[in-house]
Amino acid sequence: MITPTRTARTDEPASALLGTLAAQGASGALSTEAGIVYLAAGHVVHVESALTPDIGDLLTHSGALAPAGWWEAIDQAGRRCRVGRQLVDSGHLAAGALELCHLGALFDAAYFVLAHDGPALRFRPGVSHWLGAVRAVPVDTVLRESRRRRELLHRIWPEPAIDLAPLARVPGPDPADLPVRRSRTLTQVDGVRTAAQIATALACRTFHTLVELRRLAAAGLVVPKAPAPAPSLAPAPATATAPVFAEPGPAPRPTAPDEPDTALLRRLLHALEAL
């Protein structure tokens, strides 16, 4: 087996590098612009992204786990990368509930990490996630599921800006016949929140929220909010009013030429006469 080494950014897509690392049975963390994929023996054990709620948010906001229990597990087992095991052993969470939530968070984050299949930034061999091993997933399964989700969302509404931009409602009364989940999602659209923030507020998986948001967009109820225009550095245009000039002051009075000092000239004349 080839031992993977630390890599710098290349033009190789993240999906291709994941396939190479899987074939090598690599363990470590592969970073992309959208998140990090954690591998153990060539399998994906966790994926995290700033664009999706993490597993702690999903567990605590849904009521499956008290926040105190979550932070207690972090304090006791985070350094040993055994937070998941600690939650189960302490009785705070059933193993099945942890596995279900973990897989949901993994596939949600993997969708964003692989959505545009940008280049990998770096691979750090031997790096483990603090959650620890919960359920390992083959790389091929992660890639296939990410592709399936991307195609499904495209069929619902082909505008990918819905996934990332702050979302705003289209002015008008809310329809009364929306399904319950879609209606709850619409109530969270406020012109500020993104899909990930709406998912966190609803304690819902991001992909399910994306499905509802794209359906709302297809119905003409939600649009991505346009970014604010950047401040212009050019000078402000002149107004249409006539320019105002300062009133001219009085013209300076011409000065008279200095008169000769007649006393001095008389003394000089007397001096010359004396000579």
Image (cartoon, rainbow, N blue to C red):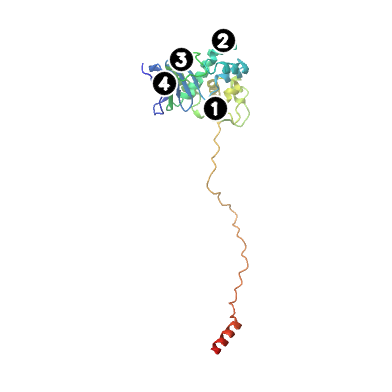
For the residues labelled 2 and 3, say whether their Cβ atoms are less than 8 Å apart.
no
Distance CA(mark 1)–CA(mark 3): 32 Å
Distance CA(mark 2)–CA(mark 4): 32 Å
Q: Farthest residue toward the left?
A: 1
Q: Which residue is mark 2?
A: 89
Q: Residues within 10 Å of mark 3 (few under 14, many from 20)?
A: some
Q: Residues within 10 Å of mark 4 (few under 14, many from 20)?
A: many
Nearer mark to the viewer, of 2 and 4: 2
In percent of width and height, residue 242 lies at 59, 57
> Please, what secondary structure does the residue beneath circle 3 have?
strand
In percent of width and height, residue 152 lies at 48, 21
Q: Residue at x 60, y 25 (%)?
A: 186
Specify whether 45 is left or right of 86.
Answer: left
Q: Which residue is mark 1?
A: 217
Residue type, numbered disc 2? Asp
The disc placed on residue 18 is: 4
Mark sitting earlier along the chain (2/4): 4
Mark sitting earlier along the chain (1/3): 3
Tell me, yes or no, if residue 179 can be seen here.
Answer: no
Nearer mark to the viewer, of 1 and 3: 3
Specify whether 7 is left or right of 98.
Answer: left
Residue type, numbered disc 1? Ala
Q: Residue at x 55, y 89 (%)?
A: 274
Residue type, numbered disc 4? Leu
Above or below, 154 relative to 133: below
Distance CA(mark 4)–CA(mark 3): 13 Å
Nearer mark to the viewer, of 1 and 2: 2
Q: Residue at x 54, y 27 (%)?
A: 217
Nearer mark to the viewer, of 2 and 3: 2
Q: Residues within 10 Å of mark 1 (few under 14, many from 20)?
A: many
Mark sitting earlier along the chain (2/3): 2
Residue type, numbered disc 3? Val
